[in-house]
Image (cartoon, grey):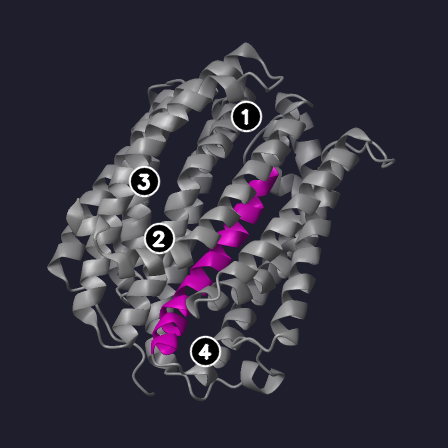
């Protein structure tokens, strides 16, 4: 333990980077929990409709995450050499790719909402409510693409507080608007699920505008001119796409796998998908700290590799893994303790509550494995430029292990949703074993910041 806690420099940098990210995600998850609880007052149908509609945003946001993660590998290493010019060029390419993806998702969601929702469920009321919600929320996808691009590149330049503060303000606005528009408070009309969609869109647009105003008024490193944003000549494009495309494909394959899980849960029944959405929202309160650790790990390791300090990058990786193991074990116990009090706040059927409780128990016991995988694959392998191996582990295992087991459990064995979820967790164990083997081989370190 002294190996971990006696390194004051490591902890100083880690806390500086991780704390704002953790706080941002904690507030996001807390307010997301409040939103789901508000929608939960409308019953299982509303919870299922919004949860399924948000699967499209989930797919879009993971595409954005794949693109921005690929960019961040480079920008973190460029920041290690203080190459601001190429950071801005990379940001421009990131925006171009993210906005292109946002446009495609928005068009599909706006023009064919009933068909999209119908992939997940045959319940006509869920399809109707989900379609209304999806058409409105799809307007905000472009704003999310812009916000994510600037926020991730900001973090890779060690500016982590600004994205957190702006996100907190936007999420707070979202919660207030939802409270007003769902139930008719503050003089707003009572719009139910449609009100939740309007509140979400308004908050995301506010977040984007405020972030850009602050970035350019303060002339931060990412305050790029249009000329720099569209100039890609200084970038090592072949190396760039060889590294980034596996990240994007990973997120696409992984997100489609997770979407398949949700489709399976929804096909089991409306109560099952409602229970999973509730459990997942509660569980996210415990996973936020490890998302923060994974992001901080990626920044620190990327900066050290960019600066030519590979030995220190390996040491940082070991310390992050140990810290994650200890922390996730503690938070797994805490998740079990808060399960009953939070579930009592939902106005849903007894069967939904029972399903959600059982899923949460499995989520609590699997938290260390899931958290270690995030830090290993996102924080270490990707930041080291080892994106092809990360793709094979992440995307390969979910489709060769997780999805077949989900289909087997639901449609062959016809098990309840919580047992199907337990079978799915097998893929996390396989990922962990493969990820640890790759980390200790030390073959994941690749310097990408050399001049083009």
Is 432 on the left-hand or right-hand side of 65? Answer: left
Look at 38% across and 54% down and name the residue there.
15
Q: Which of label 1 and label 2 is nearer to you? A: 2
* Sequence-first disc among 3 and 1: 1
Look at 31% across and 68% down and name the residue there.
302
- The residue labelled by disc 1 is 274
Residue 405, visible in the rendered structure: no
* Sequence-first disc among 3 and 2: 2
Which region is colored magenta? Answer: 52-80
Residue 223, visible in the rendered structure: yes
Measured Cα–Cα span from mark 3 to mark 4:
31 Å
The vertical placement of 345 against 167, above or below, is above
The vertical placement of 94 against 361, above or below, is below
Circles 1 and 2, Cβ within 8 Å, touching? The answer is no
Look at 34% across and 76% down and name the residue there.
80
- The residue labelled by disc 2 is 294
- The residue labelled by disc 4 is 87
User: Relative to the observer, which residue lies in front, 450 or 231?
Assistant: 450
Secondary structure of residue under mark 2: helix
Secondary structure of residue under mark 1: helix
User: Relative to the observer, which residue lies in front, 372 or 251?
Assistant: 372
Quarter of the image holding residue 307? bottom left
């Amino acid at each position: 333990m002294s190996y971990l806690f006696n390194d004051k420099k490591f902890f100083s940098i880690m806390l500086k980077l991780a704390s704002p990210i953790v706080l941002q995600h904690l507030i996001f998850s807390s307010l997301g929990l409040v939103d789901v609880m508000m929608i939960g007052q409308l019953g299982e149908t509303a919870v299922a409709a919004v949860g399924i509609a948000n699967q499209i945003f989930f797919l879009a946001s993971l595409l954005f995450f794949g693109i921005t993660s690929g960019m961040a590998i480079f920008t973190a290493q460029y920041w290690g050499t203080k190459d601001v010019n190429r950071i801005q060029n990379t940001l421009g390419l990131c925006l171009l790719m993210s906005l292109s993806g946002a446009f495609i998702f928005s068009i599909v969601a706006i023009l064919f909402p009933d068909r999209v929702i119908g992939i997940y469920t045959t319940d006509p009321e869920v399809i109707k409510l989900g379609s209304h919600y999806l058409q409105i929320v799809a307007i905000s996808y472009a704003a999310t693409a812009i916000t994510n691009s600037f926020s991730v590149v900001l973090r890779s330049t060690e500016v982590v507080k600004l994205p957190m503060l702006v996100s907190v303000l936007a999420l707070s606005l979202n919660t207030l608007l939802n409270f007003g528009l769902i139930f008719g408070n503050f003089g707003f009309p009572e719009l139910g699920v449609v009100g939740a969609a309007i509140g979400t869109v308004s908050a995301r647009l506010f977040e984007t505008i405020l972030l850009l105003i602050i970035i350019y008024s303060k002339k931060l490193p990412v305050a790029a001119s249009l000329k720099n944003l569209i100039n890609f000549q200084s970038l090592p494009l072949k190396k760039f796409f060889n590294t980034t495309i596996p990240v994007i494909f990973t997120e696409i394959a992984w997100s489609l796998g997770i979407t398949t899980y949700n489709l399976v849960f929804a096909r089991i029944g409306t109560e099952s998908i409602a229970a999973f959405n509730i459990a997942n929202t509660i569980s996210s309160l415990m996973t936020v700290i490890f998302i923060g650790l994974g992001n901080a790990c990626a920044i620190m390791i990327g900066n050290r590799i960019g600066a030519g300090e590979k030995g220190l990058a390996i040491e940082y990786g070991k310390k992050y893994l140990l810290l994650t193991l200890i922390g996730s074990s503690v938070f797994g116990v805490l998740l079990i303790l808060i399960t009953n009090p939070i579930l009592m706040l939902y106005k849903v059927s007894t069967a939904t509550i029972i399903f959600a409780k059982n899923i949460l128990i499995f989520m609590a016991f699997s938290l260390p494995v899931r958290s270690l995988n995030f830090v290993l694959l996102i924080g270490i392998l990707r930041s080291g430029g080892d994106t092809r191996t990360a793709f094979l582990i992440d995307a390969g295992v979910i489709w060769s292990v997780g999805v077949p087991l989900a289909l087997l459990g639901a449609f062959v064995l016809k098990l309840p949703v919580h047992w199907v979820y337990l079978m799915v967790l097998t893929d996390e164990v396989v990922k962990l074993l493969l990820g640890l083997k790759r980390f200790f081989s030390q073959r994941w370190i690749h310097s990408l910041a050399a001049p083009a």
